[in-house]
Image (tube, rainbow, N blue to C red):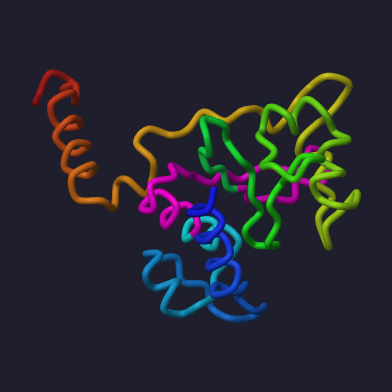
Amino acid sequence: RERVMAVFEWTVRNIRRTPDGWPVDDDHILHIMIRRHGLDDQMADVFSTLSTYAGVPAFWKIFEHPESGDKLVLSFANVDGAWAVFDVARGLVFRDEQGDFADTAELAADPELVRVATGLLSQGDVDYVPYFQSGEDLRRVTPPVAPRPLRAELQMPWPRLRHEVTQRLTRRPRNGSE
């Protein structure tokens, strides 16, 4: 909890949203940290990568609004076996009524908890509720399936080597030519 919150607070404090009209460079998170600005997905990538390096597995995902098509980038960190939800770009940690991290299962099951977690029906320019629930019983943000390996792990030497070797050993020949 302390590690993920320290990484979250550092990211929110140090990586700002790229101003409108500025060129967008989509490159390594190190460059984003040096520039100290990025788009929503880049900020989430910095948070997720640093969290994973700190021993808290994390990843990010883009969700689409069911009506407008607007995009929302949310990050997920595995804290005590549950996937806590973060909106890094807006500095929002989703929490339950007791102030603990709210996990995706709780948020998807109860739209009222989304309102409580965000403090209002909307946080600035985002109404979160439609991202978590659409229709009578169709849940949009469900407990995520973490990608394997995590994106951040592919930047670590040993996990990257293991991944590359596994990929080479399990690659199926194409057209019988390999």
Give the image location of residue 145, x and y in percent.
51, 28
Residue 91 against residue 112 in the figure, above or below: below
Is residue 56 shown left or right of residue 129? left
Give the image location of residue 76, x and y in percent.
56, 43
Q: Toward the viewer: 81 or 66?
A: 81
| Stretch in magenta | 47-74
Is residue 144 shown left or right of residue 110? left
Residue 70 part of the magenta segment: yes
The residue located at (46%, 80%) in the rendering is 35
Is residue 156 shown left or right of residue 106? left
Residue 159 against residue 18 in the figure, above or below: above
Residue 66 part of the magenta segment: yes
Give the image location of residue 51, x and y in percent.
45, 52
- State which quarter of the image contains the C terminus: top left
The residue located at (38%, 46%) in the rendering is 55
Give the image location of residue 176, x and y in percent.
12, 18
* Displayed quadrant of residue 131: top right
The residue located at (46%, 71%) in the rendering is 25
The residue located at (86%, 25%) in the rendering is 135
